Amino acid sequence: MSPIHFPRVSAEEAASMIKHGQTVAFSGFTAAGAAKAVPRAIAGRGREIHDKGDPYKLNVLTGASTGQLDEVLAKADVVAWRAPYQSSKTMRERINKQEIEFTDMHLSHLPQTVLFGFLGNVDWAVIEAAEITSDGRIYLSSSIGASPTFMHCAENVIIELNRYHSVRLSEMADIKIMPPPPHRSPIPIYEPLNKIGFPYAVVDPKKIVAVVENDEPDGISPFDSPDEISRRIAHQVVDFLLNELRAGRIPKEFLPLQAGVGNIANAVMSCLGDDPDIPPFMMYTEVFQDALVALMEQGQLQGASTTSLTVSDENLRLIYDNMDFFTPRIVLRPQELSNNPGVIRRLGVIALNTALEFDLNGHANSTHVCGTNLVNGIGGSGDFTRNAYLSIFMAPSVVKGGKISTVVPMVTHPDHNEHSVQILVTEQGLADLRGLGPRERTKQIIEKCAHPDYRDYLRRYVAESPPGHISQNLRHAFDLHISLMEKGTMKFWE
């Protein structure tokens, strides 16, 4: 049988194949490994069709947020429905105006949900790859995400062959699609660097209708340097982990860490690397961020399992220029493995995530402002929080110049409940909620985490609440939020 030669086409030609109302699954977990040329061409095609007065909107899937992919599609008004996560300013605005229907999902659930058809048929998968073979082996680029499942389920596949990425990324890749229940065996990952799959994804070559050549970096900007608030939060976390280590509640070899995306998480990782009393450690996480590159070079981070190299272009180039060093130390997996609850629990992962707000009982809100306006989505934080050995949530005690307290009587949207959240941290202090009843838990959160400007109010709120197992006053639970919406500040007493 002669080898199949896939047609090379322009991004515009590829985009012209995608019809109004279809579902398109794009590669990308953050901007890492996200499709680039074809989404821009889809946006251009959408504008042309709209100018003629005709409809053109798509249902869009990705592994997680995707940076510019979401932004260009949202600006062109070509998205009708989106899942499972996003971080685009324009996409967020359209979702909150109810112009785009958004399904917020735990990221580990997405591949199985797609595989079982719960989200309908996938008409197209548009996937970035570093290399492709004629028999349908796809060597993915800087993220794995849900791309293997997307290609497996899609009726048609477009490959963005991006020559910017190192073909040696396959040496990091560990790709496996889990069989459907009840025929799943235990996942044999017993330490973060175990591999159980293949260095490539597989797709029926007959599905591949086009290859678009590309040579673009992921375009990820460096994180800001940690500010004073982030550093104080980071030191609180490090001191806590050291105390747990000395008390024998963390073994001497330490435990794998997970850290969410953002400046606070980056600051915590840097602080962990700077402390000589923290032993060298491993990570079992969903994103490999900038701070981890230096930690790995220093030998403090010995290895990391992830689904995405979410690093700045400068650090990605550093990794590509030193693949002999990095490839044995990093494993890139599909998100249903990087975020798998069973593996997280087996390895005893310490989870470090940020929240928008948390309340006096320990519930955390990581997705919605005042219970209505979406910020980004739950992402993978729930996958780790519910199953971690230690689940730690971090936030500054106040934001917007003190107009907003992140410690409130009742969260307006509970993403993580009190049964999963164990440790709360702000720059004011750390509340260890393990084993505490509601009254003591409330006291710890107010005295150790709340900003001094809000403590008197929070104390009064508890004192004036009716008796019960949990102290809540439903007549006043959202007074802070109502004041924020009406006056622009939670300090209604001023």
Image (tube, helix red, strand yellow):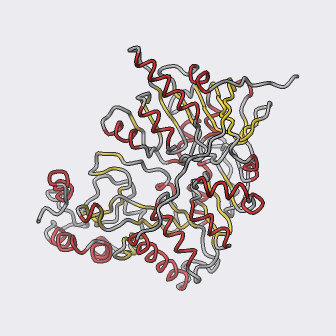
- Location of residue 327 (image quadrant): bottom right
Position of residue 60 relative to residue 109, above or below, is above
Position of residue 176 relative to residue 61, above or below, is below
Position of residue 371 relative to residue 465, above or below, is above
Question: Which quarter of the rendered picture does the N terminus lie within?
Answer: top right
State the image coordinates of residue 27 (x, y, percent, origin top left): 59, 39
Residue 62 appears left or right of 166: left
Residue 230 appears left or right of 311: left
Q: Nearer the viewer, residue 333 or 297?
A: 297
Question: Which quarter of the rendered picture does the C terminus lie within?
Answer: bottom left
Q: Nearer the viewer, residue 387 or 165?
A: 165
State the image coordinates of residue 249 (x, y, percent, origin top left): 54, 79
Determine the residue positioned at 37% across, 65% down: 395
Residue 295 appears left or right of 322: left
Determine the residue positioned at 44% across, 27% down: 78
Position of residue 382 relative to residue 92, above or below, is below
Count of numbered badges drawn on the protein: 0
Residue 183 appears left or right of 229: right
Determine the residue positioned at 55% across, 36% down: 114
**Which residue lies most toward the bottom here?**
246
Q: Nearer the viewer, residue 225 or 280?
A: 225
State the image coordinates of residue 432 (x, y, percent, origin top left): 40, 75
Determine the residue positioned at 54% across, 74% down: 272
- Location of residue 125 (image quadrant): top right
**Which residue lies most toward the left here?**
493
State the image coordinates of residue 485 (x, y, percent, origin top left): 19, 51
- Location of residue 422 (image quadrant): bottom left
